[in-house]
Amino acid sequence: MEGYIRRLCKDHNTTAIAITPSDTNLFQPPTEPGPANKLLYQSLVGGLIYCLKTRHDIRKEVVYLSSKCVNPCVSDLKKAYRVLAYLNNTLSLGPSFYTKHGAILCAHVDAAYGVHMDGSSQSGYYISIGQDSAPICCYSAAQRSCVSVSSMEAEYVALSSCGRKLAHYRYFLSTIGFPQDNPSTIYEDNQSAINLASAPQIPRKSRHIHVRHHYIRRLVEDKIVNLVHLPASSMTADLLTKPLHKSMFIPFSHKLLNIPTSLFSGCTLHPTTLFHNTLRLAHLCPIHNTYDRLSIRY
């Protein structure tokens, strides 16, 4: 992927670098609403979509920008170039697939309530084999099927969507010789959504939620999934739902891609400083340069 990103930067004549792929105004109304070069924008976004094969840390930005391909504005084009500048600064980043916990599925779920201009919320989750491995499935998109009226409902809808996908992966692993004997853990940072999914009956104040979103309740009752509360400060799935400051984005992106902490052993530079100086992580410890190949260890 490093060579492809270099060619993409060369094709679009970009040498800029950025520490994060987006500013905090990613979902906000455009500051420069004038029309942009449509072919240039579509070409750039198309290249960024290909990068999603290994770069899950830019998923929410690319998914959002791809929805603007019909009528892009100048602000959208600048946001796309910001993502490219981030990739140019982190050429060697990529997922590392290994775990010490065995072939055990787990998932992290999050939602950002009402962040889009039309009032839609942003859902995001990722599923991994082992809590310390890079994701085998990563999802980030706006909740277009419904408009959530509370943060609890937005998290609950995202929880149900993740539960359906997790059930598919449990069946897939069982067919290839890795049955899931225990409930799969789903980490969620909204306690109200967990309580609703685990409640014996649906409360009256939640009866407006569409019946299909209550699928997660059946998964909990059948002990297919186990919901565990995780503080927002440790919720890596925040990376897939909302723009983050670099102080949170860098450690979350490292955790999402499962970058070994040993890469920084013996190095006095803070990870933020590494980004500032555009040092490639693989150069710090070449023996761990396994980002672009699959290496699952059970």
Image (cartoon, helix red, strand yellow):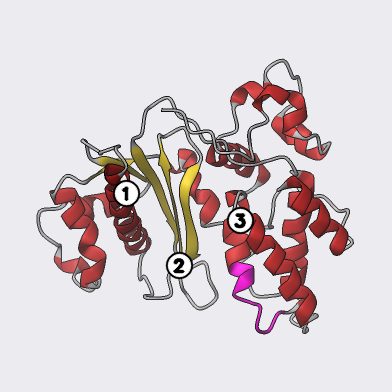
- Point out the frontmost of discs 2 and 1: 1
Tell me if residue 215 comes above or below residue 192 in the rendering: below
Quarter holding residue 123: bottom left
Return the residue at label 3: 52
Residue at image location 45% in from the left, 43% down from the top: 232
Quarter holding residue 203: bottom left
Left or right? Give the position of 231 relative to 267.
left
239 or 284, which lies in front? 284
Residue at image location 33% in from the left, 59% down from the top: 152
Left or right? Give the position of 202 relative to 12.
left
Query: Which x, y percent locates residue 87?
Result: 74, 50
Residue at image location 48% in from the left, 40% down from the top: 233
Does the rendering let one see residue 24?
no
Does the rendering let one see residue 193?
yes
What kind of residue is marked 3?
Answer: Leu
- Point out the frontmost of discs 3 and 1: 1
Quarter holding residue 10: bottom right
What kind of residue is marked 1?
Answer: Phe
Query: What kind of secondary structure does the magenta stretch mostly adopt?
Result: loop
Q: Are marks 3 and 2 in contact (CB under 8 Å)?
A: no
Query: Which x, y percent locates residue 69?
Result: 66, 78
Considering the numbered disc 1 on the image, is that residue within a helix, a strand or a loop?
helix
Return the residue at label 1: 172
20 or 167, which lies in front? 167
> Bounds of the magenta span?
64-72
What kind of residue is marked 2?
Answer: Ser
**First along the sequence among labels 3 and 2:** 3
Measure the C-alpha gap from mark 3 to mark 1: 23 Å
Considering the numbered disc 2 on the image, is that residue within a helix, a strand or a loop?
loop
Tell me the quarter of the image containing the C terminus. Answer: top left
Return the residue at label 2: 121
**First along the sequence among labels 2 and 1:** 2
